Amino acid sequence: MIPELGQLTLTFAFALSLLLGVVPLVGSFTANERALLVAKPLAVGNFVFTLLAFIALCWAFYHDDFTVVNVATNSSSILPWYYKLTATWGSHEGSMLMWVMILAAWTALVAQFSKGLPLLMQGRILGIMGLINVGFIAFSLFMSNPFERSLPFYPVEGNDLNPLLQDFGMIIHPPLLYMGYVGFAVSFAFAIAALIGGKFDSTWARWARPWTLAAWMFLTLGIMLGSWWAYKELGWGGWWFWDPVENASFMPWLVGTALIHSLAVTEKRGTFKSWTVLLALGAFSLSLLGAFLVRSGVLVSVHSFAADPERGVFLLIFLLIVIGGSLLLYASRMHSVRSQARYELFSREVMLWGNNVFLLTATLVVLLGTLFPLVHKELGLGSISIGEPFFNQMFYYLNIPFALLLGLGPWVRWKQQKAAPLLKPLSMVAVFSLILALGTLAATQSVTANLALLGLLLGAWVGLSALLEIYQRLQQFGSLSKGIAKLQASHYGMTLAHIGFAVLVVGVAMTLTYSEERDVRMEIGDRVVLAGYEFELQDVYKLNGPNYGGEAAELDVRTVDGRYVTHLHAEKREYKIQRMVMTEAAVHARLSRDLYVSLGEALPGNAWAIRVYVKPFVRWIWLGGLLMSLGALIALLDKRYRRPTTAVEVRHA
Amino acid sequence: MQSRRQKRLFSILLVIGLIAGAIGAMLFALSQNINLFYTPGQLVQGLGEGKIKPDVGQRLRLGGMVVPGSVKRDATSLKVSFDLTDDSGEIATVEFEGILPDLFREGQGIVAQGSLKSATVLAATEVLAKHDEEYMPPEVAEAMKGIRHVPPSQLKQSERSSANYGG
């Protein structure tokens, strides 16, 4: 009964989204105020009904309704209740419904928080959002129905949730990631609405900015959590694999980052207009490309859902309509737009232009590396894979000028900057970066490591420069305390996000340089020494979990001079229903290093294969991501985004 | 105005130069990092119409089914070697030191990455078996059309359909 209700409410939502996609848009051309006013209730209604559908599916999962195919294949009665609920978005169908629900939520949020927008603009934005809703709800209803029943012959027990997904990470990783992906639909809708209207003033950028920041914040958090989850769940201690599906989420992130910066120029200076619009179209198009790559089965990865060519074709057509339609509109409208503002070669505008160039080059690298194997195969040249070294090498070279520029950028004024006033503070930053980097390396007694030195240098350069810049800015208000209260939230946000990037760079460089890994054969009582830590295998015994069995290993860790550090408990679980083996690594985390142990297979002679890692600074990678999203959060709370838009004049900060 | 125009021309040329350089560097890096995929049959008989065989020392990916009974472990270390096969019946050997993936099993399709040690022996740096029993790398599935591979879930499904269906 409940699943049928879910299907029914989803059908209602489909009808409402159709109306939302048609009525206000038509109304915007016929200047029909009533047609425009109806957008908001339609958006809210669409959200309510998709939410009901989602809750209905959660209900089916919670109550083990195995007559629903989706529940039977992705859940089981012995699954703990919280994983039953999260299994709702563990499958292709369920996650698509969640995607739809989140899209509807963004649409309703735009409807709620767009009071400052002119009615015409509101109607157009919501109308575009409505059309995107139509596409995805149609996909969910007709191509991947999550409520499909298998009556009258249904299984008495479900197939269980993929053990890989039975983890805390699964509870929050997909929702956050989808919030980010789908959030770019808002920037997209703003851009399309502006294209239809043909008006690109700085107010447009001011409206779009907080939404873009919000989407970017969620995407950053989502990617970061995914990385952390893979690190502890896949059992080989990696935090980024250049896996095609990771790449699919990384591309919209890169373009989204470029978009945030380009929007700043458009808002403050009224230039880069056509470029900003193109980035807004690109960010969402890449989100869609990601959805297509993951769900069509053209790519193979740990993340991909079961292959289904029909679904792939639907998504491909949708993707082509969105990209083709928006680019056509762009081409027909954008040639008339001229930016008036003038700026010199050394100016904030050019700095941010540089930021965009590097971010887009990075996007191109990822796109090429991800799609090249596909093209290669389709051309009949054989199956290939692109090795990780390709990505690592390219990002290594791209990151150096990017980080140098990033340290410089915030200091440079709009329009024109004389070099002389910057020499003193920046040379100070450079000297202190050098001292800090060399000092850190001296403390770890290894001054020869090039990558670590470079990472520390760049990280310190970016971080110190950001700190000194905000300190000087605060002092310009007269006194420091006055400045702290008066400085715009968006400036704090920027500084924090840049420091986050610095932390990330340091984390990556240090982890790559100093990580030590050993796969060893250990019997009980054996010890292994790695990077100044001694691991002793104390015991291995049988496990008995609710839906899994397996083995657990107990290890004690001491420093080489005998001081007790911690106790580690690593598991190797065998899930009963899916008969899958999963490694639950034991991690002892500190800001300066992680100790990481995972239990491998049993070997002849009462021994086990055990993988031991010491990974310095690996936490900094996720800490950096966290700081970046926090920066975005603070920036989007800036008061000026909530000022009524009648005050059109823009302060030149 | 002339200087302004010159400036613009200069910056455009600079940008084009940078882009060309970047793309060139990218493509070069890409060409250095392509790992071709082989099955044991292709390793022995050569790949494609040209029957190209890889050189010893070349980095490549080798995919196939682990021959039951071929897994040999070293008693004191984590060294292991096993044979892979495909529907051609040819056999290639993989040597590896380290922890095999959780789902490594005899009769399972796997992919090993590494460099070629001799004509049919691969020194693997990485062995991949997806975290899913139904998984068979598509390249492997394609190469093994002759060998019947029943995904475990289908097996279970058929058991279940005979015994467990409720009303």
Image: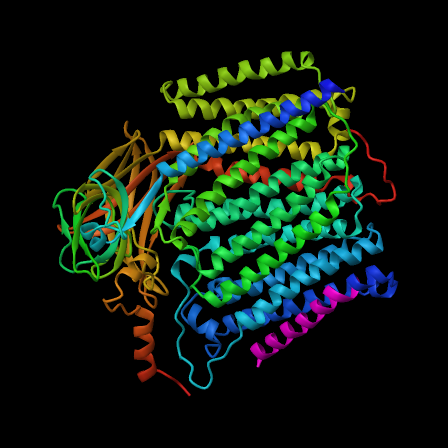
Asked if B2 appears above or below A531 in the picture, the reply is: above
Q: Nearer the viewer, residue A473 or A248?
A: A248
Q: Looking at the rendering, in which quadrant would you find the C terminus of chain A?
A: top right
Q: Residue at x 64, y 67 (%)?
A: A50
Labels in figure, total: 0
Q: Nearer the viewer, residue A89 or A545?
A: A89
Q: Nearer the viewer, residue B50 or A653?
A: B50
Q: Residue at x 48, y 52 (%)?
A: A169
- In this picture, residue A547 sits left or right of residue A23: left
Asked if B138 appears above or below A593 in the picture, the reply is: below
Magenta segment's dominant SS is: helix
Spot occupied by residue A499 in the image (x, y as percentages of width and height): 58, 30
Q: Nearer the viewer, residue B18 or A83?
A: B18
- In this picture, residue A188 sits left or right of residue A383: right
> In the rendered structure, does residue A506 fall within the stretch colored magenta?
no
Q: Which residues are magenta?
A: A1-24
Can you see residue A240? Answer: yes
Please, which residue is most extreme toward the bottom here? Answer: B167
Q: Looking at the rendering, in which quadrant would you find the N terminus of chain A?
A: bottom right
Q: Residue at x 71, y 44 (%)?
A: A210
> In the rendered structure, does residue A5 fall within the stretch colored magenta?
yes
